[in-house]
Image: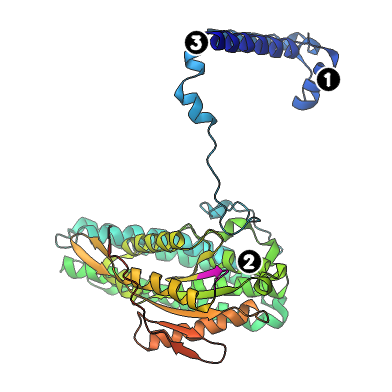
Amino acid sequence: MVLLTLVIGVSNVLLGFAAAVYLGFGPPGLTETWEAMTGNPPAGKLSAQTTAEEESIKEFVEGLASISLEDMLDSDADDEMSVEPYDELYDDDAAELMAPDDPENWELDEKLIETSILKLNIAMMKSGARATEIDTRLRECRGSTDKQTIETCLAMLREDCETYLSEQNMEAEKFSERIGELGELQSLGEEIETTNLEQAFQIETTLSNLEFTDFSSDLEAANLRLLEEINNLRVARHNLRDNQEAAFLAIARYENRLDDIEQRLFIDPLTKICSRIGVETTLHRWWTQGRHKSRPMNGMLFDLDAFGEINKEHGCLVGDKMLRLISQFMEGEVGKGDLVGRFAGQRFLVLVFDVGPQAAVRTAEKLRQSIAKTSFRHEERRIKLTAAVGIAEVSPEDTEEKLFARLEEALVEAKKAGGNLSFIHNGNKTEEIEPPDLKTKPAKFLI
């Protein structure tokens, strides 16, 4: 009872004091403070035109007075005041990262040639979203495909191709005009230009196929043919995306501007973990701080085996869900101070601190074996997934590029050996890891 009386008394005093200050009756020091904080003079200094505002304040104060103590102390109020704990992504210096959910509203620096690459990627992201919608519609009606669905999806795919081709051509022309700005990296710009031409050629081929293929006589065959065309576009789009992202980073690294990249690009919009750009900018910061010299560090590069076939058979919507689940699993299995990022389409980079090569191999094998024992169910169909892994220890003399090269070399050997294996690069050559039996438990996910 005493506590209740105290709360009511303090609330009334504070409300009355705030209203008095606002209306100009507070001590001179508080009056000037109000004016400095709000940019407006207190109500007592305003002309007659502020009468309506005074009435609003009066209604506000009266409204507060009418609120019961129970309402002021209810659980909803507690919920609104609660603060969620913040888990830092990489280390104590990690900045809050934002996902690029609305790329058309990014504030891009038009003076930078990387902006042209980003705009090409934005056009590609929009096209990819439209293609996923069409792909999903077609798969939902397989076995009972109707004419209306085929006609609608055909029109949508044609419109998507024409829209993307127009946007891509416009941005590609702007990029071509600026290739000379790349200096020693001009050959890199020419590679991007070539990849864009290949993408445009694939789109034009798809448009020609849509124009001259019979999509009316056999509706189920028409469904499969449209899905095939969408998959061809997807493969070309993914190659272009990886190529352009690598070029973006190469330019920023060459011009020593990795620290100036827009932070919204650090998160992969699909998986919500670190993107390739986020990975490389984080490593650049770590290298600048000398962490690779002061703390043991090991890298792992995972590549999901035959993932393109999963996309082709089950659709990119299913594939995207699998990528999200895998990324969440991997991030949950490493320490908070470690790094997990989507390095390319179905590739994931993991860097772990404060462990030696043997412990790193055990971590890599635990992840690989867990993925192999995981099954995904979609429409009563069971989808299995495996991954190949390349492992490398970071030496004090390493650069980021040298580390990536050794990881890539080890991963290539693991893929050549059939996948679902781990290879380690010891600094001189790659060696296959004899898989230890870690007794990982099977897991099932419904998609």
User: In terms of secondary structure, where does tag 3 sit?
Assistant: loop
Q: For mark 3, does the 10 Å Cα neighbourhood hold few (<14), some (14 to 19), or many (20 or more) residues?
A: few
- Residue 389: x and y in percent read 43, 78
| First of labels 2, 1 by sequence position | 1
Q: Identify the residue at horizontal 51%, vertical 12% (top origin).
A: 69
| First of labels 3, 1 by sequence position | 1
CB under 8 Å between callouts 3 and 2? no
Q: Which residues are magenta?
A: 350-355
| First of labels 3, 2 by sequence position | 3
Left of 204 or right of it: where is 89?
right
Residue labelled with disc 3:
68
Cα separation, mark 3 vs mark 1, equals 33 Å
Marks counted in the figure total: 3
In the depicted view, which residue is nearer to us: 278 or 158? 278
Q: For mark 1, does the 10 Å Cα neighbourhood hold few (<14), some (14 to 19), or many (20 or more) residues?
A: some
Identity, as a three-letter code, of the amino acid under mark 2: Thr
- Residue 212: x and y in percent read 28, 74
User: In terms of secondary structure, where does tag 2 sit?
Assistant: helix
Q: Against 17, is 243 above or below?
A: below
Residue labelled with disc 2:
281
Q: Which mark is residue 359?
A: none
Residue labelled with disc 1:
32
Left of 265 or right of it: where is 365?
left
Identity, as a three-letter code, of the amino acid under mark 3: Ser
User: In terms of secondary structure, where does tag 1 sit?
Assistant: helix
Cα separation, mark 2 vs mark 1, equals 46 Å
Q: Indicate the quadrant where residue 132 lies.
A: bottom left
Cα separation, mark 3 vs mark 2, equals 53 Å
